[in-house]
Image (cartoon, rainbow, N blue to C red):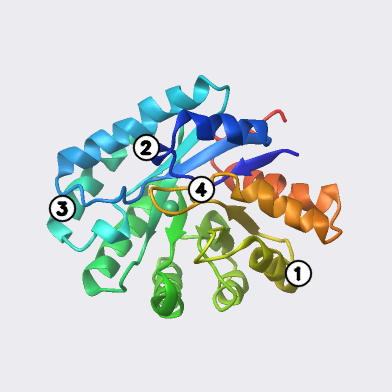
Amino acid sequence: MRYIEPHAHMVSRTTDDYQAMLTAGCAAVCEPAFWAGFDRGTPEAFYNYFLQLTEYEPARAAKFGLPHYTWLCINPKEAEDPILAREVISFIPDFIDKPNVLGIGEIGLNKNSRNELKVLEWHIELAAELDQLILVHTPHLEDKLKGTKLILDALKAHPKIKPDRVIIDHVEEHTVDIVLDRGFWAGMTLYPESKCTPARAIDILENYGTEKIWMNSACDWGISVPLAVPRTALEAKARGYNRRWIDKVIFQNPVNFMKQCKKFKKPDA
Ligand SMILES: [Zn+2]
């Protein structure tokens, strides 16, 4: 089995996790900028985090022969302070041409607040200006449907944003159709408790098909499983899906989305 882990917060994981992922067939890992379990609070802390994502973490992954890519932004959980957000956004262009940066992400909404929406719009404008791909985080539980609609409206309102170049992550049964219907890519996050379990993810694929959709483990600082993608592939296999079907979802689809950024190289796996 070969797969791409398109959304993993490796700064929270050990080198053992890298080894386990490689053993399971991981051919590339992509790490959006997000919350790290605490509020960083200062622009300098975000600057250092961007250095970690663009210099240290790719070097750590390279020790295991694993290509590491990243996405940059100030995440929605820390976007309540527009002054801090403005400052962080101001130095994203300094990092955007680094060889492992694929675009702007994971931007979006957390509590659907007015300030979060304003910061989301600034990021969308930045992505349009710099012609970058976008990776979007959608809110949890009861805020998800409303937040997803607000995000899609904000993206659609920008004349330069093409839905083909945007992935809306953490979709669930009640949001996947509006995302795909409006031409965006959709990501399913496989968590042991919330978001999608492996069985729910395969159910969603059975209902909505395998076009423009991927799966990821998110594997962050909280309860999460770095091998969730290959384990879900085993669930698909147990339901009778063949190698080709599985390969499309866990390898070809992420490659097809991310290769829209010229820096992403299709792994030789
Ligand atoms: Zn994430």
- The label shown at residue 225 is none
The front one of 54 and 121 is 54
Q: Are marks 4 and 1 in contact (CB under 8 Å)?
A: no
Mark 3 vs 2, N-terminal side: 3
Left-right relation of 206 to 50:
right
Label 2: which residue? 96
Mark 3 vs 4, N-terminal side: 4
Mark 2, other Cα within 10 Å: few <14 / some 14–19 / many ≥20: some
Mark 2 vs 1, N-terminal side: 2
Q: Judge depth for marks 2 and 1 and give the one in front.
A: 1
Q: How far is mark 3 from mark 2, CA to CA?
A: 19 Å
Label 1: which residue? 206
The front one of 70 and 206 is 206
- Does mark 3's beta carbon lie closer than 8 Å to ligand 1? no
Callout 4: SS: loop
Point out residue 89 in the picture as x, y percentages from the top left corner.
25, 48
Mark 2 vs 4, N-terminal side: 4
Instruction: Please name the amino acid that badge 4 sits on.
Output: His
